[in-house]
Image (cartoon, grey):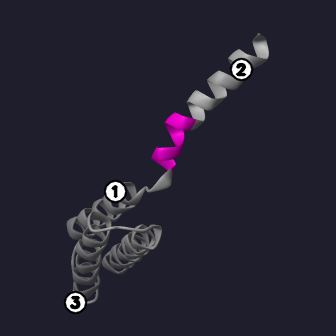
Amino acid sequence: MKTRVVVAVLGLVLALTAPALAFNCPVVIKQAEDLIKKAEATKVNADSKPLIDEAKKLVAEAKAHHESAKVKKDHGDAIRKAKTAAAYAEEAITLATP
């Protein structure tokens, strides 16, 4: 009886968490957007502005990939673009700080 309960609970936990782990595009996109906001809040200079602009462009592309996703690869593209946007924003923050 205990074994059945444990198996049922584990099955329920797996069923509830698997969809959440499948595609985390919105989470990665949100992280990139937060970094872009942080970059814009710093002292934007001639070196950091193009990086912020590129990050914004990539986030828009990531959102489009996620919204029109039909297969896993589309979600992978969205995540890759969002992570690249986050990297550009981080670089902009680094260049803007003395």
Q: What element does badge 2 sit on?
A: helix
Point out the tag, 1 or 3, that comes first from the N-terminus. 1
Dot 3 amino acid type = Ala
Dot 2 amino acid type = Val
Q: Looking at the picture, how far across and down is residue 48, in whole percent?
A: 27, 83
Residue 82 placement: quadrant: bottom left
Q: Whole-Å distance between the Cαs marked 3 and 2? A: 60 Å
Q: Looking at the picture, how far across and down is residue 84, in whole percent?
A: 41, 77
| Chain part drawn in magenta | 15-21
Point out the tag, 1 or 2, that comes first from the N-terminus. 2
Q: Looking at the picture, how far across and down is residue 6, in whole percent?
A: 71, 20
Closer to viewer: mark 3 or mark 2: 2
Give the residue at mark 1: 26
Residue 80 relative to residue 41: left or right: right
Q: Looking at the picture, how far across and down is residue 1, in whole percent?
A: 77, 10
Q: Which residue is drawn at 47% across and 46% down?
A: 19
Give the residue at mark 2: 6
Q: Which residue is drawn at 33% across and 67% down?
A: 69
Closer to viewer: mark 1 or mark 3: 1
The disc label shown at residue 46, or none: 3
Please say if the residues under marks 3 and 2 sit with CB atoms less than 8 Å apart.
Answer: no
Judge whether 1 appears above or below 55 on screen. Answer: above
Few, some or many residues within 10 Å of mark 3 (<14, 14–19, 20+): few
